Amino acid sequence: MTYTPPLWPVSVKGIALDAHQRVLLLKNEREEWELPGGRLEIGAGTTSQPPDTSPEAAVERELQEESGWEVKCGPLIENGVWIYEPIPGRRVLIVTYGCTVLTPDRTPVISQEHKHIGVFTESEIAHLPMPDGYKLSIYAWYRTLRAAADLDDYERM
């Protein structure tokens, strides 16, 4: 008998904020809000569909495909790697990155992959139907950005 190890799907996600510091979210078929992102593409071996060269490149590609926003993928989010079970018996490893939006004034455009698209303030996140792992990641990214802003203020003194 040949041993076949169990495989876990991996989904890379990006936290992206618009010019008003609102986080971009997409509503899926389960009526949950989620971060934009998806699986790594292995490509078709052609120039029209090349493979992703890294998880960060996949986040950048997915955000552009799902919202029209161009981003630069940044660091892994503290506590942003977690296991999600969207349906019983189906587990997915979620890997979450913070992103810098290169087009923050552009209105996001929904793709065919989701039901709705929206931008939400930090205070609105708690009340949204969304897995706790996403909420914790979003809050961690806001904390990271505030800490960086505080450091910048200190350095200017």
Image (cartoon, rainbow, N blue to C red):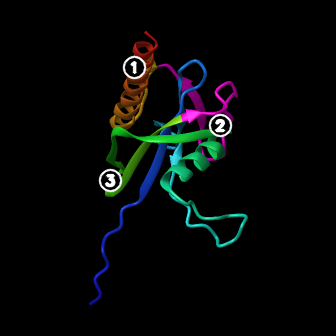
Q: Range of the magenta residues?
A: 100-121
Mark positioned earlier in the residue sequence (3 or 2): 2
- The nearer-to-camera label among 2 and 1 is 1
Query: Which residue reaches farthest bottom?
Result: 1
Image vertical order of residue 76 relative to residue 138, above or below:
below
Query: Which residue reaches farthest right?
Result: 48
Residue 68 percent location from the top left of the image = 68, 39
Q: Amino acid at mark 2?
A: Trp
Q: Which residue is mark 1?
A: 151
The residue depicted at 52 percent of the width and 36 percent of the height is: 99
Are the two marked residues, 3 and 1, in contact with CB atoms closer than 8 angstroms? Answer: no
Q: Which residue is mark 2?
A: 69
- The nearer-to-camera label among 3 and 1 is 1
Q: Which residue is mark 3?
A: 88
The residue depicted at 43 percent of the width and 25 percent of the height is: 145
Q: Nearer the viewer, residue 75 or 131?
A: 75
Image vertical order of residue 106 relative to residue 93, above or below:
above
State the image quarter where residue 143 is shown: top left
State the image quarter where residue 118 is shown: top right
Residue 146 percent location from the top left of the image = 41, 20
